[in-house]
Image: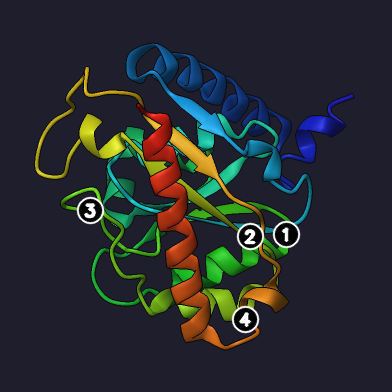
Amino acid sequence: MFGWLRRKHPGSSLPSLLFYEVCRNITQILLMAILGLRWRGTANMPRSGGVLVVANHQSYLDPPVIGAVMGTRQFDFLARAGLFDIPFLRRLITLLYAVPVKEAGGDPASIKAILRRLEQGRVVLIFPEGTRTWDGSVGEFKRGVALILRKSRCPVLPVGLAGAFEAWPRGSGPRLGRGRVVVQVGQPISHEDLLADGVDAALKRLRAEVDALRERAEELRR
């Protein structure tokens, strides 16, 4: 009866699947009303199997914004390890499939967790810049992402986000009325295609694709 829901996040219990789905729908409605959230290209999300979603990082809004617009799958995402020290928040983000990651230096445990979840056929959202932008542009992708790309063996889905920086810039609180937030989803790239010329070329290609999608999303804000 709930097979369609179980396919969105393999291996999860029915209560957690339902909780995520309710949260996603409520979040989508709120973001549409408050931020004018719009999206394009979400049909490009593969319907099954592990998928690594790679996006630019503009603000704290990015994970809920991207997760809210892709209703065909449920996302795992990275969250700062310190957030898991807050009891209520730890319970909430665990129910929403968060993966704890250390804020400084490499974190082999989080990389292993990401790869394990991809092997289970789940969707994992990462921000290769490693930190939020200071000016809305797309920064360099961190070398730590290279290990995930090399070992994941799954398609990568590039995503460009625009407007979230204006809505909640780094070093400031939320700012409403700064224009729409738009998500532009690109075409999935197979593991073989992406790594054909090596990891360094793969990182450059992904950054270029994400930046082009961000620019397209920026055009849709006007």
Q: Nearer the viewer, residue 16 or 183?
A: 183
For residue 169, side relative to residue 217 (left or right): left
Q: Which residue lies furthest to the right in this view?
A: 1
User: As drawn, is 189 to the left or to the right of 125?
Assistant: right
Image point (22%, 24%), residue name: 178
Q: In the image, residue 160 lies at what x, y percent? A: 45, 47
Residue labelled with disc 2: 117
What amino acid is labelled 1 in the image? Answer: Gln
Asked which secondary structure carries label 4, the reply is loop
Q: Earlier in the sequence, mark 4 or mark 1?
A: 1
Residue that lies at the very extreme toward the top in this rendered image: 33
Residue 99 in view, yes or no: no
Of the image marks 4 and 2, the number of the one nearer the N terminus: 2
Residue at disc 2, secondary structure: helix
> Marks 3/2: CA distance?
27 Å
Q: Residues within 10 Å of mark 3 (few under 14, many from 20)?
A: some
Q: Distance between the residues labelled 4 and 1?
A: 22 Å
Query: Which residue has dot 4 on it?
Result: 195
Sort mark 1 into few (<14), some (14-19) or many (20+) by Cα contacts within 10 Å: some
Residue 117 seen in the current view:
yes
Q: Which of marks 3 and 1 is in front?
A: 3
Between tags 3 and 2, which lies in front? 3
**In front of the other: 191 or 130:** 191
Residue lying furthest bottom: 198
Q: Is tag 3's residue or tag 1's residue first in the polypeptide sequence?
A: 1
Instruction: In the rendered structure, find residue 120 and report the number of the disc placed on it.
Output: 1
- Asked if the residue at tag 1 contacts the one at tag 2, i.e. Cβ–Cβ closer than 8 Å, the answer is yes
Residue 105 rendering spot, x and y as whole percentages: 27, 76
Closer to the observer: label 4 or label 1?
4
